[in-house]
């Protein structure tokens, strides 16, 4: 009898351990000019995550991205915190993921508003969202705080600005340091 109980506890222990270590992860990213995309691809490889590109329904042209132009699309969107650029394509299995790495370029010191569109398109309740970004030089500033209302029941973690196309090894070290 003791032996049977021992086997049952062992099986339960292994099952729990497996459930904990087998967390399913997603890397979702928006990249206007390809810099964040490279990091996202490496991150997905390192973490064995599924990869989803947040594609704008209307792609951004070079003129749209001109931050010096007060009338460019990006300037207009970023000046209007209520703007929600439409996304082409949808994920149909968001419920499967426990952890979502969410990547984007820093625009005007925060996340592009299409990231708000993404967060408001799904229910992230109970999930952990780890932010990563690329930028000219800025850090996250108030990015995490400003995204929280778009995913009120998620735990948003300010991850890291991963500039300079870091190696997979460096990305792996960062992921390990998160202790998720
Ligand atoms: C509209 C716009 C605004 C930007 N604002 C900032 C900024 O506030 N700080 C910064 O360091 N870089 C800024 N950048 C530079 C981008 O964050 C940087 O080039 C990024 O790596 C681009 O990533 P992507 O190629 O994935 O789109 C901005 C770029 C654009 C197009």
Image (tube, rainbow, N blue to C red):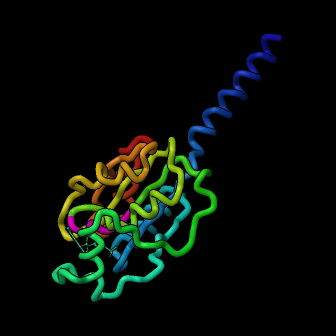
- What x and y, as percent, mark residue 133? 32, 62
Q: Is residue 166 visible?
A: no
Question: At x 18% / y 80%, what residue is drawn?
Answer: 70
Residue 58 versus residue 5 in the image, above or below: below
Residue 127 versus residue 72 in the image, above or below: above
In this rendering, position of residue 27 left or right of residue 163: right
96 or 92, which is in the foreground?
Answer: 92
In the image, which residues are magenta?
A: 103-108
In the rendered view of the protein, which quadrant contains the C terminus? top left
Give the tally of numbered discs.
0
- What x and y, as percent, mark residue 52? 52, 67
Q: Can residue 101 be seen in this view?
A: yes
- What x and y, as percent, mark residue 149? 37, 49
| Magenta highlight on residue 125 | no
Q: Please tell me in which quarter of the rendered image ligand 1 is found.
A: bottom left
Question: In the current view of this chain or complex, which residue is farthest to the top?
Answer: 2
In this rendering, position of residue 41 left or right of residue 74: right
In the rendered view of the protein, which quadrant contains the N terminus? top right
In this rendering, position of residue 141 left or right of residue 59: left
| Magenta highlight on residue 107 | yes
Question: At x 28% / y 77%, what residue is drawn?
Answer: 74
- What x and y, as percent, mark residue 168? 40, 62
Q: Quadrant of residue 78?
A: bottom left
176 or 163, which is in the foreground?
Answer: 163
Question: At x 34% / y 63%, what residue is drawn?
Answer: 82
In this rendering, position of residue 98 left or right of residue 78: right
Question: At x 41% / y 72%, what residue is drawn?
Answer: 85
């Amino acid at each position: 009898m003791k032996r049977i109980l021992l086997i049952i506890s062992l099986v339960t222990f292994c099952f729990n351990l497996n459930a904990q270590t087998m967390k399913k992860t997603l890397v979702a990213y928006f990249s206007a000019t390809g810099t964040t995309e490279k990091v996202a691809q490496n991150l997905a490889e390192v973490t064995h995550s599924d990869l989803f590109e947040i594609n704008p329904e209307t792609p951004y042209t070079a003129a749209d991205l001109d931050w010096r132009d007060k009338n460019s699309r990006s300037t207009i969107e970023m000046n209007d915190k209520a703007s929600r650029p439409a996304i082409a394509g949808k994920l149909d299995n968001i419920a499967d993921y426990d952890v979502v790495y969410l990547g984007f370029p820093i625009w005007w010191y925060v996340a592009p508003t299409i990231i708000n569109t993404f967060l408001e398109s799904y229910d992230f309740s109970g999930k952990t969202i780890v932010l990563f970004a690329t930028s000219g030089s800025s850090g996250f500033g108030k990015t995490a705080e400003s995204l929280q209302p778009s995913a009120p029941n998620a735990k948003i973690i300010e991850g890291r600005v991963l500039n300079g196309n870091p190696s997979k090894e460096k990305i792996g070290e960062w992921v390990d340091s998160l202790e998720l």
